[in-house]
Every structure is written in structure tokens, then in C-alpha cells.
Image (tube, helix red, strand yellow):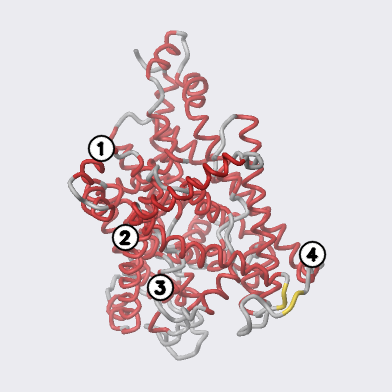
């Protein structure tokens, strides 16, 4: 069957619209990249859009020389790794226990967890709690309060529920206890979902800034996102790279910001092509259970 | 959820109950490893989720920083009366409603349209390419997104370059309150369009091909097919996501606004969450800010439950 003329026209227009969407989506990335290689004068004159002007890599050198940037970058790595390990452990044991039909109070406990998705304590009570626990200026303020994402837990739970019962029965006849079944039988069979969850958590931790911003006031403890935030806010970054004086209100130049942004996005962009299918499958799994 | 009426226990039922209790104990002993897995998560939920909920009592009690975390003495609805009489509160409340409604109005339908357009692409490679590119902004840190927005809207940014290219005068967007809503909503669309289309794209693949064949035989062109086959096919997904979105429409991007706004544009950009952040943590009016936060959470909770209840009545679809 042949397409009508109007459908042919539509297809051309559609392709153009989609290309335009891609362009708009990608443009800010290209723009930042271009600015990171440009000289400040060209950026301030509003002349850097898609291609670098006044090409140089001096800005990268300047940022690379800033010890605080690397300290904060390293913090981000540590917070991400520790946070992801804690989150994975807590989410897995919770999801596994709740996935067992023989568990007493299973329904109540699930509701108990789900309720927290719709009602949370709010900013101030959280702030008061974390400080009263003595978590301020420590990694715990960042990795503990958000340890379990109930949403992720529900995805994992429904995955475990769909695993055949016979597997576990066979394993327990072989003398494995519950821990053994979980860690030696179930987890090796759940690699795909585990990878997805791990990515969700890791990206979340890598990108997070607010808890550090809220609970930390020592620069050497900041993750790189807070370092970047301070550059963008332009006020507190007086001591960081590129600032011409110690004046707190020094305007941080655009190329410094761009380089910092590029270096912060880089790890995510590098793994993105390889892992995006896991993310997508994670969303699908989530939709099964609503 | 259903609640069962509790009937007074008869003697033989009591005996059964006792037996049950004994078997509960036996079950616990036999299966203690399974139950032990629950210990840490439950402690976590109690301290870090339910703890702050209880911490909301300071909305009704005078709180002194450094003092008792549950406040010093009862003051009743004092702080609630305070914010109800606070003109600033009503200003940020209105801002929150407007910004939430605008965000929903644009970020909800655009992914559907995007999915429908993508669905018409027959070239698999091109489709994949567009999809992959469109997901990318979803994985960025909000700090980076804010940085990009500020850079693009600045006097030397690309948007002004475009305006000047067409002969217009540059606009200092972030100093002009009337631009904030447009910038915020656009950035939300930019970030969420591709990601938001995933579920629709999945739903589109489940539509039975024979329905299209039948429509073709009836003489329906591609547009009619879209109207009568495609859209009804993804309608359940649309409704479910609409419930989710409407339930959370007050919970607008607090972190993003915090990173973007400045005192010059508070008039349109200041929302409930940013306001309570400032009065609470920067001016140390903890109880006052908690009262505002509690008010917002309760409205949010009511919204989710009522939208869900309405949807269950009208469409027989609900989240639980």
C-alpha cells in the first residue's frame, strides 16, 4: 500500500521536527564543551555557541591545578561508592524479605514503607534530626538518610516475587539457610536487575548536592557538585581556581564553570551509551507494579 | 484498603488464637533468618522516615535551636495562624500553584506527542538515535542543569546571541521576574521529555497490529488510525501517569529553584519550599517553617489520595 501525499509530507516534517528536538537536547552540552575550550573574552562577548573561539586548554590546566577541586572530586567518588553499597544492601534485604509470601505482616510492612513515599517529614524536621544525630560534616549525612528508595525497593520486590519457588525449595533441601539462598542462589540470578538498581543509586549519589550543601560547612568535605554550585553561585568560591582575588563576590569566569561542568558530567556521559538500556529496563519494571 | 470489622472473640476463638500465637512463636524461631533481614530496614524507616514525621510536632511547639529536638513547650496553632496572616506566605503559595500548574500543563502532554512522533519513524537506527539523545538530560545533576540554564540565559549566553542575530535587543533573563516561569518550565520539558516518553513508547509496541490493518481496510488514513487506534491503545498509560503527576504537582523542583533564583526575581520564583528553606534555616525560625512544611505535605497527601479516588470511580484505574 502506498502512502498518501500528505503522509509523505508529514514524514518529512516529522523527521525535521525530531532532528530539531535532538539539536535542542544536545545543544547545551555542546555549548558547555565549546566554552570550556574558549577564551574568556570570546565567551563574555557572547560569541561562543557551537564551536570554541580562541581555542585553548589553559582553563583545564587551571582547574586541574586546583587541589580543592580534586579533593571534592575524590569525595564524590567515595560518597557514591559507599552510598551505593549501603543502598544496595539495605534495599536488597528489605525487598527480599517482603517478597516472601510466608512472611507474617508482609502487607502491613509494605504499606508501612509505601506510606513514606507519599508523606515525608519535611525539610526542617529532617534537618533537626540529622544534626541531633551528630551527622553534620560527616559522610553519614549524605549516604544514610536516603539509603532506601522505596520505589527501587518495590521494583526489586516484584522481581523477586516472580522467581520460581522451586529454586529455593531445592536449595533449602540442599541445606542452604535463608542467607545462603539469598546471596548464593537469588542474587546471582538477578544480575540484570541488580545492575539497574546499582546504576540508579550510583547516578543519584553522583549527582546529589543538597544534603552536602545542607549538612556540611567544611570545604574539604564537599562533593564536586557543591564545589560547582559554589562556582555558579559565584559567592563562596573565592579561594577556588581562577578567581582573581580573595574577594567573596568575585565573578567566577564562564570558562572555569564550563570546565568544571564538563569534568563533572564526564563519567556519566562515558558510561551512558553502555548502560542506558539498563535504565530503560528499570523504568519498564517499575511500571509493572505502578 | 479494606478494614474488617472486629467481632468480639468467642471462647473457642480465643483458644484458636492462643494456638495461633504459639505457632507464631514457632514460625519466628524456625524462620528467624528471614525476619532478621527486616531489622535494619525497619530501624532505618523508623528513624529516618517516621522520625521526621514525628519531628513535625515542633510546628505546634516552640523550638530552640540546640534545645530539645521535639521543642520546649506547646503553643497550639500559633505558627499556623502566623503564616495564614503572612502576606509572603500567600504570595509563595500562589507562585507554587501557578508554577505547578504550568509545569503539568507542558511536561505532561509533550512526552506523549514526542512518543507519537517517534512512533511514526520506520527507520530503527534513526529512532534509536533520537531516543538516546533525548534521555541524556535526565541523567544530569540538577547543579549542572542550573549551571547550563544560567549560562544560556546570561547576557553573553546563546539565547541572547540568537535574539541579537534576529535583530532584537538582549534580555537579562535572570534579572526579570516575568521570564522565570517560562525558563523553569522550558528546562523541565528539556530534561524530562525523552525520559517521560519511555513508558508511552513501550505501551505503543503492545498495540495489536491487526487493529491497524482493520482500520486501513475501513479506509482510515494514518491520522485517523492514530486517533482511533493508537491513542485509545495508550490511554490507560496516559491516565495512570496523569494521576501520578497530578498527585505530586505541588512538589515542584525545590532544588532547581534554589539554584536558579535570586532576590530580584523572588516575585515569581519564590515557592513554598524555598520560602520555608529561607525562613527556617537562614532565619532560624524552625517552628514557623515546620508549620508551613507540614501544611504543604498534608495538602500533597490529600491531593494524591483524592486524585486516586476520583480516578478509581471514573476510570476504574488507581494506583492501589
Q: Same chain for marks 2 and 1?
A: yes
* Label 2 – label 1 distance at C-alpha: 40 Å
- Residue found at x 42% / y 16%: B211
Q: How many marks?
A: 4
* Chain ID at mark 4: B
Residue A85 is left or right of residue A104, and the answer is left
Kindly indicate whether the residue at mark 4 contacts the one at mark 3 (C-beta within 8 angstroms).
Answer: no
* Label 3 – label 1 distance at C-alpha: 56 Å
- Residue found at x 60% / y 47%: B247
* Chain ID at mark 2: A
User: Quarter-wise, where is residue B318 in the image?
Assistant: top right
Q: Same chain for marks 3 and 4?
A: no
Of label 3 and label 1, which has the lower sequence position? 1
Label 3 sits on residue: A257
Label 2 sits on residue: A268
Please state the horizontal and vertical placement of residue B149, each as a whole percent of the image: 49, 62
Q: Same chain for marks 2 and 3?
A: yes
Q: Eyeballing the image, is B208 above or below B289?
A: above
Label 1 sits on residue: A166
Kindly indicate whether the residue at mark 1 contacts the one at mark 2 (C-beta within 8 angstroms).
Answer: no
Label 4 sits on residue: B84
* Label 1 – label 4 distance at C-alpha: 60 Å
Q: Eyeballing the image, is B169 above or below B279?
A: above
Q: Residue furthest bottom?
A: A246
Amino acid at each position: 500500500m502506498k502512502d498518501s501525499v500528505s503522509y509523505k509530507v508529514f514524514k518529512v516534517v516529522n523527521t525535521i521536527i525530531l532532528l530539531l528536538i535532538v539539536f535542542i537536547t544536545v545543544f547545551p552540552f555542546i555549548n558547555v564543551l565549546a566554552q570550556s575550550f574558549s577564551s574568556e573574552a570570546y565567551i563574555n562577548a557572547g560569541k561562543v555557541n557551537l564551536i570554541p573561539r580562541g581555542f585553548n586548554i589553559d582553563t583545564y590546566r587551571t582547574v586541574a591545578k586546583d587541589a580543592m577541586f580534586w579533593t571534592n572530586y575524590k569525595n564524590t567518588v567515595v560518597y557514591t561508592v559507599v552510598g551505593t553499597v549501603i543502598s544496595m544492601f539495605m534495599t536488597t534485604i528489605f525487598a527480599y524479605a517482603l517478597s516472601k509470601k510466608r512472611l507474617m505482616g508482609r502487607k502491613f510492612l509494605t504499606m508501612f514503607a509505601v506510606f513514606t513515599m507519599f508523606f515525608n517529614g519535611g525539610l526542617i524536621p529532617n534537618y533537626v534530626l540529622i544534626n541531633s544525630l551528630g551527622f553534620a560534616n560527616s559522610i553519614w549525612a549524605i549516604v544514610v538518610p536516603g539509603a532506601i528508595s522505596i520505589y527501587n525497593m518495590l521494583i526489586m520486590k516484584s522481581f523477586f516475587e516472580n522467581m520460581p519457588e522451586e529454586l529455593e525449595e531445592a536449595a533449602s533441601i540442599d541445606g542452604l539457610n535463608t542467607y545462603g539462598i539469598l546471596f548464593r542462589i537469588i542474587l546471582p540470578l538477578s544480575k540484570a536487575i541488580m545492575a539497574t538498581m546499582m546504576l540508579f543509586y550510583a547516578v543519584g549519589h553522583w549527582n546529589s548536592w543538597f544534603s552536602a550543601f545542607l549538612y556540611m560547612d567544611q570545604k574539604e568535605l564537599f562533593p564536586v557538585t557543591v564545589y560547582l554550585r559554589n562556582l555558579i553561585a559565584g559567592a563562596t568560591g573565592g579561594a577556588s581556581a581562577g578567581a582573581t582575588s580573595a574577594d567573596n563576590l568575585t565573578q567566577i569566569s564562564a570558562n572555569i564553570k564550563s570546565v568544571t561542568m564538563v569534568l563533572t558530567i564526564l563519567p556519566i556521559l562515558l558510561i551512558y551509551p553502555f548502560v542506558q538500556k539498563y535504565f530503560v529496563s528499570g523504568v519498564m519494571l517499575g511500571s509493572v507494579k505502578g | 484498603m479494606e478494614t474488617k470489622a472486629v467481632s468480639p472473640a468467642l471462647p473457642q476463638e480465643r483458644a484458636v488464637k492462643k494456638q495461633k500465637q504459639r505457632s507464631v512463636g514457632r514460625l519466628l524461631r524456625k524462620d528467624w533468618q528471614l525476619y532478621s533481614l527486616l531489622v535494619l530496614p525497619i530501624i532505618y524507616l523508623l528513624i529516618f522516615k517516621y522520625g521526621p514525621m514525628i519531628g513535625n510536632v515542633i510546628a505546634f511547639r516552640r523550638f530552640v535551636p540546640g534545645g530539645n529536638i521535639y521543642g520546649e513547650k506547646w503553643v497550639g496553632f500559633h505558627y499556623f495562624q502566623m503564616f495564614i496572616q503572612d502576606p509572603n506566605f500567600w504570595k509563595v503559595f500562589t507562585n507554587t500553584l501557578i508554577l505547578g500548574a504550568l509545569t503539568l500543563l507542558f511536561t505532561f502532554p509533550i512526552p506523549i506527542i514526542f512518543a507519537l512522533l517517534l512512533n511514526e519513524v520506520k527507520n530503527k537506527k534513526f529512532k534509536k538515535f533520537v531516543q538516546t539523545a533525548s534521555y541524556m538530560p535526565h541523567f544530569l545533576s540538577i547543579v549542572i542543569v542550573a549551571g547550563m540554564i544560567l549560562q544560556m540565559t546570561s547576557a553573553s549566553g546563546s539565547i541572547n546571541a540568537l535574539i541579537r542575530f534576529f535583530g532584537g535587543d538582549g534580555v537579562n533573563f535572570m534579572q526579570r521576574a516575568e521570564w522565570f516561569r517560562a525558563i523553569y518550565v522550558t528546562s523541565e520539558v528539556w530534561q524530562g521529555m525523552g525520559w517521560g516518553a519511555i513508558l508511552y513508547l513501550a505501551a505503543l509496541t503492545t498495540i495489536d497490529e491487526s487493529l491497524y490493518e482493520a482500520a486501513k481496510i475501513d479506509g482510515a488514513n494514518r491520522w485517523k488510525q492514530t486517533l482511533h487506534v493508537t491513542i485509545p491503545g495508550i490511554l490507560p498509560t496516559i491516565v495512570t501517569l496523569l494521576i501520578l503527576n497530578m498527585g505530586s504537582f505541588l512538589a515542584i523542583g525545590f532544588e532547581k529553584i534554589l539554584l536558579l533564583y535570586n532576590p530580584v526575581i523572588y516575585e515569581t520564583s519564590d515557592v513554598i519550599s524555598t520560602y520555608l528553606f529561607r525562613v527556617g534555616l537562614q532565619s532560624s525560625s524552625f517552628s514557623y517553617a515546620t508549620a508551613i512544611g507540614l501544611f504543604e505535605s498534608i495538602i500533597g497527601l490529600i491531593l494524591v489520595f483524592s486524585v486516586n479516588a476520583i480516578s478509581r470511580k471514573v476510570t476504574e484505574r488507581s494506583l492501589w
